[in-house]
Image: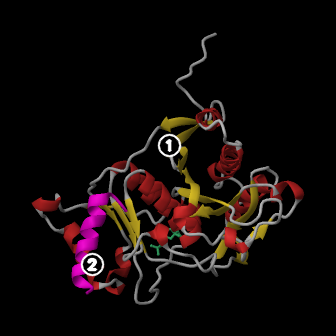
Amino acid sequence: MAINRNIQTLDEFTIQELRNFPRATGELSGLLRDIGLAAKRVNVEVNKAGLVDILGDYGTTNVQGEEVKKLDVFANDHFTGVLQHGISCAGIGSEEIDDVVIFDDEISNQSKYVCLFDPLDGSSNIDVNVSIGTIFSVFRRVSEIGKPATKEDFLQPGNRQVAAGYVIYGSSTMLVYATKRGVNGFTLDPSIGEFTLSHPNIKCPEKGKIYSVNHGNYYQYSEGVQKYIESCQRKDKSNGGPYTQRYIGSMVADVHRNLIKGGIFMYPGTTDKPNGKLRLLYECNPFAFIVEKAGGVATNGTQSILDIQPTAVHQRTPFFIGSKLMMDELKSLTTQNEQ
Ligand code: P6P
């Protein structure tokens, strides 16, 4: 029976990638397959969240001081579990856990990588059936292999990431990840229970007509950001305006749409929250890595996200990400208005 080689599963793709790097140990491929396995398990629960008593507040609050939904905990436990019981990860950092978790067992200490993740971003949307997602970031350890991982392994600038990706639990479930070789998207085929390559070599369009921002905070934004938002709304032939405003309130869904179609996503600092809301290590860094590998740009308003030297696991940053020419427009307007 002829095997349809056109449908490449995530496992086949990562193994194929290995063949391109004969000296590779296969650890990173293994880590990505582990993440794919956890994503499939979380997907099952997300898809039936409305049917079983897994909804509702878990009654606790996480380090962000937010009500924790049961699915957040479920997702956190599954991603932590597959990585701890795999052979490719020495420790994790998670939005749901106060500090990094060093696995410190004989096998894990031999692993070259550490992983940070937001196990279920956008979880406030769970109860109303809006797309949510998992975001992950992978670093090569700077600490000595064979010994336990250290905090420094996790506090590296985003330009040191070796891989980053996200899972979007939406109308279909997709896993998108980037390495230095590019960005590839895999759609879960329920008939075989495998992620299959559906979006090879993703590129972010240089220009788009979608801008994504929470207008409710408009009067708390800087003058430059306000000017840019107004330029998006203006009927201006030079930039193809007015643009379309799309904001789901679930970062994975908003950034994924803009990555594929072209556009800009902004979570600026406000007068109440000068550093904004989004977390550098497990939300902004991974998306910045992915979008920049696809040809886009990501900044905190003044510098590249990937150049920021982290000082704390849960630190926040203002976040602007998207199509290169739109990010250039933003930069010119904010520079003019904030000198
Ligand atoms: P706001 C979800 O809670 C989240 O962390 C991101 O997924 C999303 O982009 C953002 O917050 C939405 O925040 O303040 O606009 O509701």
Q: Which residue is mark 2?
A: 334
Foreground of the two, 262 or 218: 262
Element marked by disc 1: strand
Name the residue type under label 1: Asn
Q: Residues within 10 Å of mark 2 (few under 14, many from 20)?
A: many
Q: Which residue is mark 1?
A: 184
The magenta-colored residue range is 322-339
Residue 185 visible in the shown view:
yes
Location of the C terminus (image quadrant): bottom left
- Whether disc 1's CB lies below 8 Å from ligand 1 is answered no
Could you give the CA–CA distance between mark 1 and mark 2, rounded to whole angstroms? Answer: 32 Å
Q: Residue at x 37, y 76 (%)?
A: 301
Residue farthest toward the bottom in the current orientation of the protein:
271
Measuring from the top left, give residue 57's x and y in whole percent. 68, 71
For residue 125, above or below residue 295 = below
Q: Quadrant of residue 126?
A: bottom right
- Could you tell whether 26 is left or right of 221 in the image? right
Residue 51 versus residue 313 in the image, above or below = above
Which one is in front, 243 or 54? 243
Q: Residue furthest left?
A: 237
Q: Position of residue 14 (x, y in %)?
A: 62, 38
Tell me which corner region of the image, top left, top right, bottom left or bottom right, holds residue 268: bottom left
Q: Residue at x 60, y 12 (%)?
A: 2
- Residue occupying the point 75% across, 71% down: 150
Q: Is residue 26 magenta?
A: no
Residue 320 visible in the current orientation = no
The residue that appears at 83% across and 59% down in the rendered structure is 146
- Give the image location of residue 292, x and y in percent: 42, 57
